[in-house]
Image (tube, grey):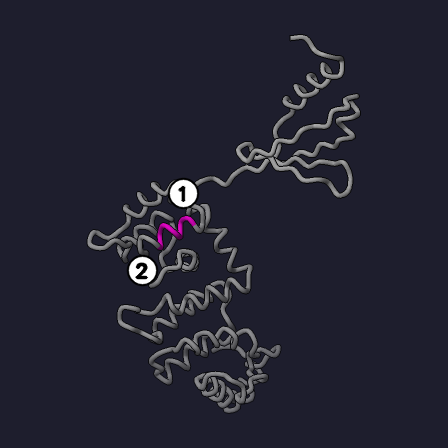
Amino acid sequence: MGKCCSVCEHNSSRERDLESLPQQTTTSLTSNQLHSSGSQHKPKLAKSSEKGFFARPGNGSHDILRTIAYPKQELDETKILSLFSKYKDDTEDAILADGMEKFCQDLGVDPTAFVVLVLAWKFNASQMCRFTKEEFINGCKEVRADSIKGLQNKLPELEDEVVGDTEKFKDLYRFTFKFGLDVEDGQRSLPTNIAVALWKLIFSKDMPVVIGRWFAYLNEREVKGISRDTWNMFLNFTESIASDFSNYDDSEAWPSLFDDFVESEREKSTNIPNDQAEEKHENGVIKEF
């Protein structure tokens, strides 16, 4: 079929030229650039979501931004279910201690590593050494991975996410208390040995200065359990109280266990020999023995 005019013939050639351009995520074409070819026809913009094209006007000009939006890679739930089945217990529809150990081996991580705690947080696990089917499936969807390789690739990103974000770290910290409870036994406070192990894990990337003395105090006083309030407030304590406790005010709403701890540490500080006191307070920081 013949061309109706020279303009249409030129436009047809121009369209072939545009189609031959390499695909990019975002390509900007201005109407002025198109008009420079001599065409008086305004370009038509495709809005089909199937082709991934979206258009919006420029800032008061005739410019047009054409964006190719690539959809996120879809997860294969069948692969997630297959992965879950590989580690689930024979007697229960959940991954238990043995399966968790094998799961961590395949991931190439120590079961006691910080990143495993982060993964449990992302999976919203209800208790230690256990992933229910729902937790595992929803967790894989949350981190957008449906294979061991996919999860391995996500681990550094997940760790960086909480280490570099104060609010997310606080959320992980609060989660860890619930995570450590034996819900089947109806626990409302953490046994001190479990709390200490979890504190060591949660703070493994950045240990508070007072943590060693805090553990020693809990051991000396034979504290049996750590309440949710004490757990949560300990993070605030480590973030706001000086290592020599000079800014600690026992009239504030701190748990009584903190009052006793600070009083004990202040007594120890005043009773040590002068030469040790000078060494202990060197550079304004109390050293741990």
Residue 140 in the magenta stretch? The answer is yes
The total of numbered circles placed on residues is 2
Q: Position of residue 25 (x, y in %)?
A: 61, 35
Q: Is residue 23 left or right of residue 237?
A: right
Q: Position of residue 232 (x, y in %)?
A: 46, 74
Please give the name of the residue rendered at 38% of the width and 72% of the height, measured from the top-left corner. 195
The front one of 246 and 280 is 246
**Residue occupied by mark 2:** 129
Is residue 217 shown above or below 7?
Answer: below
Q: Which residues are magenta?
A: 135-141
Q: Amino acid at mark 1?
A: Lys
Q: Position of residue 68 (x, y in %)?
A: 60, 35
Please give the name of the residue rendered at 47% of the width and 78% of the height, measured from the top-left corner. 289
Most common SS among magenta residues = helix
Determine the secondary structure under disc 1.
Answer: helix
- Mark 2 is surrounded, within 10 Å at the Cα level, by few (under 14), some (14 to 19) or many (20 or more) other residues, namely some
Q: Is residue 57 left or right of residue 241?
A: right
The front one of 93 and 259 is 93
Is residue 37 shown above or below 165?
Answer: above
Determine the secondary structure under disc 2.
Answer: loop
**Residue occupied by mark 1:** 149
The front one of 263 and 74 is 74
Q: Are marks 1 and 2 in contact (CB under 8 Å)?
A: no
Please give the name of the residue rendered at 50% of the width and 41% of the height, measured from the top-left corner. 72
